[in-house]
Amino acid sequence: MKEHDAFAHRTACDLTIVGAGPTGLFAAYYAGFRGLTVTVVDAQPDAGGQVAALYPAKTIHDVAGFQGVTGADLIRGLSAQAAVYEPRMVFGQNVVDIVRDEREAGLSVSLEDGSSIDTRAIVLATGVGGIRPRILPLGHGWHGRGVTYVVSEPESHVGEDIVVVGGGDTALDWAIQLTPIARSVTVVHRRRLFRAHASQISRAEALGVTLLTESEIQAIHGDDFVRAVVVRDGSGSEREIPADTVIGALGLITAPSPFSAWGLELQDRKLLVDSAMQTNVRGVFAAGDASTYPGKVALMVTGFGEAATAVNNAAVLIDPDLSLFPGHSTDEDLEPPESVPSSEAVPAGRDA
């Protein structure tokens, strides 16, 4: 996605996609395939959303066509796929308002830097919204010195003693991925039962991961870096465990979404959409974790299908002469770029 001139105060396009995670990137590809001019806006400095921020090195197994693909590789592939059609990418900008202009039969997207985008339709692919990891109670002061919340380079943990704190899928995933290269991996969970899938628990046990339930970390010891943690079990007994890295996997904290202020109907804090993935506001569609409807299964692969549905319905709304059916992608003879380095990300106030 090549860099252009500075982002103008007011620009225009057919479709604006809010969110550059997997769903938003796939929507950008499909919009380009339909011949629409596209702007993608994301508050983060790079594409990837939650995948890039929280589990770039984790292997994802439920994306069609891949026995396993890391989060970083998936985002690189989706970015390259979208880049074929040269969407304008605006990073480091929050959307602060969406206004419908009934006279112009269009919409205006306002950004926090004061610029705006005139657009015929919008796809909201914001995922769960602004997110950050839940901080370890004893992790203050140790971040960057052995305490972390994202494992971006597993190879940097070769030969380490690793303690993972948490009881969900993410905690078990990290433990399983790091066990083959670490000296030891221990998972500490304060409850009696794990929330992770039963198959993950069995796999971790088979690999030799130490699973401590009804246990909590009472102290972190070290010098310039973490060296050990003190764990107390349900009986009150304490023991010290060697630790070079402590990984916090206690879940995520999400920021409240501005959707209701934009006049969009919500259900359980998600955007309620119809079978066309359109919200109650004409021209505003939603896909991925931001949306909900009866019978929805909240998976990444579901978001890909929703993105295609939203974009194709938006295309017909923009140009009623178009067919809802997009045609077959095999009819296109496009040579994708080899890669889209993250260094090409466009900073706030610029487009690409």
Image (spheres, rainbow, N blue to C red):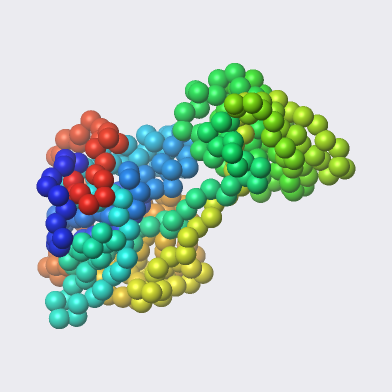
In this picture, residue 12 sits left or right of residue 98: left
Which residue is found at the position 21% from the left and 61% from the top? 115
143 over 185 or under it: above or below: below
Residue 309: image quadrant is: bottom left
The image shows residue 24 at horizontal and vertical percentages of 32, 52
Which residue is found at the position 75% from the left and 34% from the top? 230
In this picture, residue 82 sits left or right of residue 96: left
325 over 261 or under it: above or below: above
Residue 173: image quadrant is: top right
* Image quarter of the N terminus: top left
Instruction: Name the foreground residue: 60 vs 185.
Output: 185
Residue 64 visible: yes
Which residue is found at the position 48% from the left and 72% from the top? 267
Residue 244: image quadrant is: top right
Which residue is found at the position 39% from the left and 54% from the top? 303
Instruction: Name the foreground residue: 286 vs 150.
Output: 150
User: Total label count?
Assistant: 0
The image shows residue 43 at horizontal and vertical percentages of 34, 53
The image shows residue 251 at horizontal and vertical percentages of 58, 49
Farthest residue toward the bottom? 103
Residue 309 visible: no
The image shows residue 290 at horizontal and vertical percentages of 42, 61
